[in-house]
Amino acid sequence: MAHSRSAKKRILVAERNRERNQAVKSRVKTMTKKVLTTVDTKDVEASNAALSVAYKELDKAVSKGIMKKNTASRKKARLAAKVNAL
């Protein structure tokens, strides 16, 4: 257990950041799954709309430092390839 005030504060801050990061990652995964389900149903308009939302979530994750830029770029490219295959 932490003894100093600063160490106790760091524990609280780390927990808060962990929860926020987890929420953002979860949202990214959810939006990715929505794109994939719309691709499976072969609905082009819904796929494009879901892809736009997924792009936005990935970009937010990058801007907050939760995901690396290249990782988000790779995920976006793979989703776009699946949507374009329709």
Image: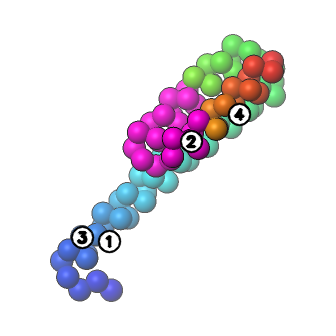
Q: Nearer the viewer, mark 3 or mark 4?
A: 4
Considering only order in the chain, which callout, 1 or 4, is on the residue closer to the N terminus? 1
The residue indicated by pointer 2 is 70
Q: Say whether residue 56 is left or right of residue 64.
A: right
State the residue in front, 68 or 34.
Answer: 68
- In the current view of this chain or complex, which residue is farthest to the top? 45
Q: Would you say the residues marked 3 and 4 are in contact, meaning their CB atoms lie under 8 Å apart?
A: no
Considering only order in the chain, which callout, 4 or 2, is on the residue closer to the N terminus? 2
The residue indicated by pointer 3 is 9
Q: Would you say the residues marked 1 and 3 are in contact, meaning their CB atoms lie under 8 Å apart?
A: yes
Question: Dot 4 surroundings within 10 Å: few (below 14), some, or many (20 or more)?
Answer: few
> Which amino acid type is marked by label 1?
Ile
Question: Dot 1 surroundings within 10 Å: few (below 14), some, or many (20 or more)?
Answer: few
> Which amino acid type is marked by label 3?
Lys
The residue indicated by pointer 1 is 11
Residue visible at 59% across and 44% down in the picture: 71
Residue visible at 43% across and 57% down in the picture: 19
The residue indicated by pointer 4 is 78
- In the rendered image, the vertical position of residue 23 relative to residue 69, given as above or below: below
Membership of 68 in magenta stretch: yes
Q: Is mark 3 on a helix, strand or loop?
A: helix
Considering only order in the chain, which callout, 2 or 1, is on the residue closer to the N terminus? 1
